[in-house]
Amino acid sequence: MNFSHQKQKNFNFSLWAILAGLLISSSMSQASQPDPASYVDPRIGNIAPFLVPTYPTYQQPNQMLRMHPIRPDYKSDQYDYFPLQILSHRKERVLEMRVSRGSVNSSSWKQKMVYDHDLEVVHPWLFETFLIEDDITIGFTPGKKAAIYRYNFPSDDQKYILIAGSNKMTAKLAGANALNITEQFTQTVRNPDPKRVAVNIWCYAEITDIQGKPAAGMEIKIDRNRVSIEFDKNAPETVLLKYAISYISKDQAKRNFDTELTSQSFDGLAATAKTAWDIQLNKIKVKGGTDAQKRTFYTALYRTHERMVDITEDDKYYSGYDQKVHKANRPFYIDDWVWDTYRAQHPLRTILAPEQAQDMLQSYVEMYKQSGAMPTFPLISGNHSCMSCYHSSVIFLDAYRKGLTNFDIEKAYEGVRKNLTQGTWIPWRQGAKATPLDKRVEELGFMPALHPGQKETEPLVDGFEKRQAVAISLGRSLDNWAISQWAKELGKSADQAKFAAISDQYKLLWSDKEKLFMPKDDKGQWININPKIDGGKGFRDYYDENNGWTFAWNVAHDIPGLIELIGGKDQTIKRLDQLFRESLGMSSIAFHLEGPDSTGMVGQFSMGNEPSFHIPYIYNYCGAPWKTQQRTRFLLDVWFKDNVFGIPGDEDGGGMSAWVVFTAMGFYPVTPGEPVYAITSPVFTEVTIDVQGGQFKVSAPASSKVNKYIQKAYLNGKPLESPFITHAQIIAGGTLSLELGPKPNKQWAAESIYPFK
């Protein structure tokens, strides 16, 4: 094949990037202190069994400016475009950027760009790709509110950078090589009814050569919502698009640019972004395990920093909750999906970044003060009433009990209480006022379900999402437990009693016959269903994304009560074993046609969806912690690989990855809201976590694929006969030493008592 000089140059450039990565990986395995960031691969999990996989997101940790190339899916060999900004996780993207050669016509603005997967360079702080049909190399590196694209063009042709927006976009020259772009993105938000909310995005951009000077041979053309940046044959081979984003104003976008990009090179910004990731990833250091396990682990840790994102700009921020700009003396964060993240992602942050966790909680408080409702899925445009219940109650309780109090506690409590006493429990309608159906929920103690074929009577119920009657009832008990426990901490005895009574009402739906939570109608009569498959798409008439076998365990706030319902510890162990062994009762195709969210199946256990995360740890409460060790090691090994298929379900921007981080380290927060972690078998021989008290270590020198069973345990040199450890013990620093062996020690911690009441 005949390569032009530029083709060969671009090919060699990408080849050397790949070889450099291989050399880093090789030397890393020999180094005494490997670089955790070198293990991160944003492509892990980019292909999922169903639904939305992970995206290879490029950003600084928890920062506003985010990018990933837009394509139909990872398997495609064409990019649709490169966005200048992603407004919210896996959702809205703005300002579509493409490159082209030769001449521009109407089709150029929708032109796809062909690439080779193996020539992509992917790190959280640096993305680079070679467009094999255009002979163009594109690089990207993120700042906090700014970023730089780098282009290596052939020298023998006209070439273009094309930026397109919606029909609300406007662009104006701000100098010979500078642009001001204003885009208005309209987002559908449910709060409670679907409505369109406009979000303004301002962008200031400069086009320069590699030295940061105006690029020669360049002409900028603007036509309504399109910007064409044309380079003739005299233009430099390498040009930069340096830009900053603001949600506040055009002038603020320019200030953001000046703060981050003045005299900043592409490589300099990449180094700054790399340092930001090093700070976060080095908070946990591991030894032992395989390189594959380290890639899985550190990539999971990277994903837990994708959200929430700090949108503060020079001590100000724009809020979609009252459409105003506010002054701020601390960071303001948005973009969180609490139904997913309260389980493990927020608890992980209380260990690794307690100050940041408190800033995020105060952000929730500010959103409540501005909108009148405590958010559940806070986006840039406002709260999106998504999924079900009000689990922000749990993240506040969890933080408070761990000593994190640097937020407006009384205002937070007020907001949580208002949600639970005045809001509806109808799924996907959080923030709406209570309805007659909610009055019936209050009277019955559970969400009444409809019989198959029975017509819906409440207009607010979504035609697709349905009532989710059992799932809502269990979630309602959890949220009321959380506020009752918080009321107890705050000395609000009347509230404690009021909400504690509701927290127990999950028991009203327990079927002793089925050993499951089953639906009842508005007369309190059982509805006879097949809990494996009934309920329509996603089992939503009765459950939510998961079937009755998963929701049988969805009372993490009262595991002792659940064990009592099942019939005691021995019966609970048998029932857990059955969960992991029970057949689908139908073909896999038939099951997944109804339950596409319920993936990563092991028997009736679904590793690919959030309500299952705590289930393998329930053995710890029953005197059989060795079974937790067996199950968690198996689940990590089977479902979490260091490749594009390495996530078993809908990862949700860090929710599932936090489970991987905790479980690989050897402990997990089964009940967020109680400062206790259940212990399991770590995959590494040593884990060192930076905490407030210095360092906390999990030492398991014999850990291997076979040596996974805890024989003995010691905390700071003293024998530990409990499969639990408290938050206070972790953040104080110290060492959890685990002697692991190839066969279970069934006596270890068999008679332990849960350390928190």
Image: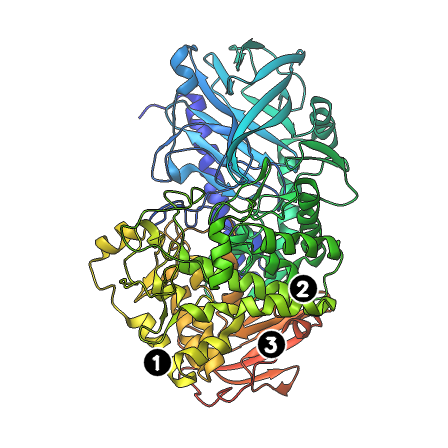
Query: What residue do we see at 50% from left, 20% from top?
Result: 166
Looking at the rendered structure, the secondary structure element under dot 3 is strand
Q: 547 or 175, which is in the foreground?
A: 547
Farthest left residue in view = 587
Compared with 479, 706 (above or below) is below
Q: Residues within 10 Å of mark 1 (few under 14, many from 20)?
A: few
Rounded to the nearest whole Å, what is the CA distance between mark 3 and mark 2? 17 Å
Residue in the picture at 49% in, 68% down: 505
Label 2 to label 1, Cα distance in Å? Answer: 39 Å
Q: Select label 3 or label 2 by which is in front.
A: 3
Mark drawn on residue 725: 3
On the image, numbered disc 1 is attached to which residue?
Answer: 574
Amino acid under disc 1: Lys
Q: Residues within 10 Å of mark 3 (few under 14, many from 20)?
A: many
Q: Which residue is more in the foreground, 218 or 256?
A: 256
Q: Secondary structure at mark 2?
A: strand
